[in-house]
Amino acid sequence: MRVVVPCETNEGLASIRSGHFGHAPWLTVVDYDDEMNLLSVTAVRNADHDTAGCAGVIEHVMGLDADAIITAGMGMPPLMRFTQAGIVVYADRVTPGVQDVLVKFAAGDVARMSPDQACRH
């Protein structure tokens, strides 16, 4: 399973999560095996929202072959596009560190994002 976490920094598991998916400068890409054991962690520069627009950021993440995204905030257009593409979006607004939110995720303690949780802007 491949999980993408939008981040403010490019420090892998030590990264600080971004408050909003589309404007995150970095993405931490994490691969798990079938038992949710961590296999790899990679920092990837995100597409620039001001240059690529929302659609460009969405396409960039889709190109990473993600199975899931863990975000603190995301608008309705990306939530719907990812959901339609079979990428599950999870929401956690209280855990600032990548490693901590991934521990919660692997334990099944991060819920799927519902449309009513999407940012309205």
Image (spheres, rainbow, N blue to C red):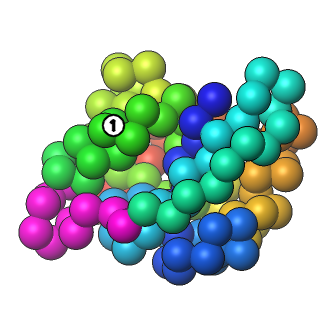
Front-lying residue, 43 or 111:
43
Residue 52: image location, x then y, percent:
12, 60
Image quadrant in which the C terminus is located: bottom left
In the rendered structure, the answer to whether residue 107 lies left or right of residue 87 reads right
In the rendered structure, the answer to whether residue 36 lies left or right of residue 30 reads right
* Magenta part of the chain: 45-54
Mark yes or no: residue 78 visible: no
Front-lying residue, 121 or 28:
28
Residue 50: image location, x then y, percent:
15, 72
Image quadrant in which the N terminus is located: top right
What residue is at 72 percent from the left and 36 percent from the top? 32
Mark yes or no: residue 92 visible: yes
Q: Compared to 34, does 78 lie above or below? A: below
What residue is at 17 percent from the left and 51 percent from the top? 56
Residue 67: image location, x then y, percent:
53, 29
What residue is at 30 percent from the left and 31 percent from the top? 81
Is 101 contained in the magenta span? no
